Amino acid sequence: MTIRRTLRSLQRTPAFTSAVLLTLLLGIASVGSMFAIVYGVLLAPLPYGEPDRLVSVGLRAGAQHRMQQPPALFAIYSRFAQSLDSVGFYRIGNANIWIAGDDAAPERVTATWVTASMMPLLQAPPMLGRSFSADEERPEGPHAVVLSESVWRTRYAASTDVIGKTLMVNSIPREIVGVMPARFAFPTADTRVWLPVRTGTEPIVDDFAYSGVARLAPGATAVQAQRDLVAILPKLADFFPYLASGSSTVTWLDEAGPTPVVVSLREELTGSIARTLWMLAAAAGLVLIVALANAANLMLIRADGRQSELAVREALGANRLHMATRFLGETLLLGAAAGVLALLVAYGAVRALVAFGPADIPRLAELGVKPATAGFVLLVTAVVVVVCAAVPAGCLGRASLSTRLRDGGHGDSTGKAGIRLRSSITTLQIALALVVTVGSALLLRTAYRLAEVHPGFDTAGDYAVVTTAAAR
């Protein structure tokens, strides 16, 4: 009965109901969407086995510049690093793929070359078939390819007998040995095929185009692993004495001064975007506060317009707690509706980001509205309901019966106290709106400048090539 009466009360004021509902929806949906993104990218565990033991293995030349690594380091690290259980190297590039005999034009896709150790290292088994074998790394080994689920579905109609069939990759027929599930988005969400790294037999250091991933040995830390690799690095000259250019590896080690860098894989994947996401989350939080102030102000105005009615009810014997529950009931219904709609909006926003967002956003394919997001939205909704109900109820508790009868009769709302409260809320709204506007402008300027920063390698062509500036 109480719910029905509250619904009728809200239906009698459609403008107020729509305004509050849309205001709360905007605020809750903004923080809910950003929480889903921040949680999925920065906070959720990586979708690999024992993710806390996974580290990125890099190389720094000089004090600051990161550089890509040669496959020769993979052989050295795999052989001598006691603090690492296993090591894998990879590089990102492009490839043309098509099915022999198919009339469709070749498709240019993102491809990733990986060592045979990579999928077992990540503990990411294929959904069909197997990962690469050591034989497929040899220069004269069989040509193999592992498909992404998207290629498997679009080109092979999700056929379960795809293993063993042939896919043309850069005019080379390759046997399909496996299919990775959609959740496997390593190293980027737009990777469509994986190819085995071909390790040369010559004792030279070449092809500075690779990044590294490793799994720590039980009990080892990233700091210990870095010390281990620093001690191992000079062995590179013992087993690979020359660079492809003909210069001495010892000379290169002395002059370039490369230093191994080991950090957690999560930090490596998300470090470049973490600050931006936290800034966006803070902006969404300010939007919620502005929306909350707007909704509270609307609730206060609604309470002001009902002062005469409430005063009469009190004069007839109704207690203030009973009257305060009317505000709570209205706010609870509006908040619950806004929370449910906010979850739907957040789901749509996240799905749109996954479908149309930049592929270089780390962990993009993993994003979704998960139970943690639903719990966060529920918590925010509860806070919103309490605040929006407390503002008019608090004014009701402070004003005496005679004051409310006098002020209500003159149409002067809750009197001077109410006017001061509304003025304070309005001032807060203006201040927060100014902060959001200025912060958004600064964020756009920062994003533009970050986009203009040279990444240290040339992304054109079939693979990344380290530039001179990055190698210094």
Image (tube, rainbow, N blue to C red):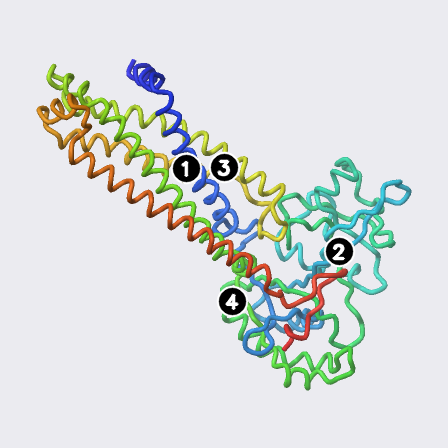
Residue 166, percent across and down? 85, 46
Residue bearing mark 3: 346
Q: Quadrant of residue 379?
A: top left
Amino acid type at image mark 2: Asn
Give the residue at x 85% y 41%: 104
Gap in angstroms between the C-alphas marked 3 and 1: 9 Å
Element under label 2?
strand
Q: Is residue 97 left or right of residue 26?
A: right
User: Mark 4 or mark 1, which is nearer to you?
Assistant: 1
- Disc 4 on helix, strand or loop? helix
Q: For mark 2, what is the residue?
A: 94
Q: Quadrant of residue 338?
A: top left
Q: Nearer the viewer, mark 4 or mark 2?
A: 2
Distance from disc 3 to disc 2, alpha carbons, whole Å, reads: 33 Å
Q: Nearer the viewer, mark 3 or mark 4?
A: 3
For marks 4 and 2, the one nearer the N-term is: 2
Residue at 83%, 60% in the rendered image:
141
Q: CA distance from mark 3 to mark 4?
A: 36 Å
In the rendered structure, which disc, 3 or 2, sits on the residue that comes first in sequence? 2
- Residue extending farthest to the left is 402
* Residue 343 position in % (x across, y down): 47, 34
Q: Earlier in the sequence, mark 3 or mark 1?
A: 1
Q: Which residue is mark 1?
A: 28
Above or below for 330 versus 185? above
